[in-house]
Amino acid sequence: MDTLLVTGGAGFIGANFIHHVLAGNRWRVVNLDCLTYAGNVDSLAGLDAGRHRLFRADIADGPAVRRLLAEERPAALVHFAAESHVDRSIDDPGAFIRTNVVGTQVLLDAALDYWREGHPDFRFVHVSTDEVYGDLGPDDPPFSETTPYRPSSPYAASKAASDHLVRAWHRTFGLPASITNCSNNYGPRQFPEKLIPLMLLNALEGRELPVYGDGQQRRDWLYVEDHCRAIERVLKHGRPGRTYNVGGNAERSNLDVVHALCDLIDRRRPGNRPRRELIRFVDDRPGHDRRYAIDATRISDELDWQPEVDFETGLARTVDWYLDNEAWWQRIRSGAYRDSAGDSAADPERDGYGGERLGTAGGAGA
Ligand code: NAD
């Protein structure tokens, strides 16, 4: 049985990826995650304990990463771990540089030595974002793999830097690494600071829905399970040194997304008045990109991957998951999910997962 090392596997996409690959393969997964506020052990519930090991460490801790590689001898590494929320990157860019840039460099150095020291078939997959390309005008063609990098936020700049490092470690040292640049994901187990789960939960609870600016920022949306399938495809068949754009062919304005959510929740849990009346426009996020769109022709042609879940179906599934898994998000609202991380001194207000940071007072975009 091959071992796969996954970083950031207690986060949104990483946890979904682990559920996905363990269900469809005979692999064992070692999950390297330091459990920041975004890491949630509850998202790993139901995994076969014999085939999943959570190893709590920081990707920027070189000796710990090297020890883990030597001990577990993984066949491949899929790198999700990152600070991922644009709003937080505006408040505290340093954390993003430390994890996304320095952490990725530490991981690359450790992986390079491991690959050189007798693991020639080892593969490294770096999971990145379409935000590295900056924003598009209304009539511009979508981002392709050759679109120049023009990141706008500290988050996007730190991810762009990490992509450059991965590309350089391949070109200069030969490390067999591939990169994926994906559009906005949504689905089960997403931390409720991001647009869709935040609006969904606020709408359910009858709270205001704070939309940034005019709500006309356009994003391409991909259901997380489709992204997991794309990463698995790149891991198994992707060419080292190659970048693959991944998207859902589902461009929507933020306001369209919020309207669709309100209407779905009205149908699932009828209230006294339409949820759309909870929408409130708030000051726009500084540097907010207007439009992202993805041309995913390469991964379709070369790796035979296409999205399988259209936006309406994916959104309905997402709403149903949150309705069926209230304990999961209530434990985030209360801060109790941090207890599973051995972090009993956590304070939801101070640590930013109980109040304002979850958009009950600020705004939300994507
Ligand atoms: P997330 O914020 O939900 O999860 C990040 C995980 O990484 C958490 O479990 C956290 O504990 C862990 N982590 C953070 N810093 C760490 C460190 N220094 N050492 C070890 N673990 C650490 O993020 P996500 O939304 O699941 O995104 C995963 C990856 O996919 C990120 O690299 C992100 O840039 C990329 N991505 C996300 C989206 C999206 O829409 N969410 C789209 C495209 C690409």
Image (tube, helix red, strand yellow):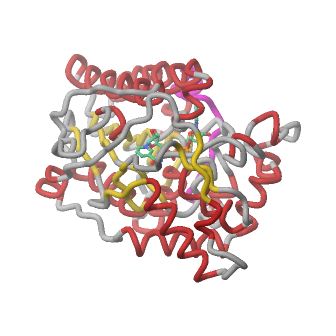
Left or right, 271 with reference to 321? right
Comparing 212 with 93, the one in front is 212
The quarter of the rendered structure image containing the N terminus is: bottom left
Looking at the image, which residue sits at the far right? Answer: 345
Give above or below for 105 relative to 301: above
Q: Is residue 265 above or below residue 218?
A: below
Q: Quadrant of residue 269?
A: bottom right
Is residue 126 among what the camera can see?
A: no
201 sits to left or right of 99: right
Q: Position of residue 222 (x, y in %)?
A: 37, 58
Please say whether residue 347 is one of the residues in the magenta stretch: no
Q: Which of 108 and 365 is in front in this view?
A: 365
Q: Where is residue 4 in the image (x, y as percent from the top left)?
A: 44, 48
Q: Residue at x 56, y 26 (%)?
A: 90
Return the residue nearer the eye: 66 or 124.
Answer: 124
Residue at image x 61%, y 82%?
A: 268
- Whether residue 60 is visible to the viewer of this picture, yes or no, is yes
Residue found 37% across the figure and 42% down from its top:
76
Q: Residue at x 68, y 56 (%)?
A: 208
State the image coordinates of residue 270 (x, y, percent, origin top left): 66, 82
Q: Give the range drawn in magenta.
A: 50-66
When the figure is inspected, residue 61 is found, relative to residue 70, above or below; the finding is above
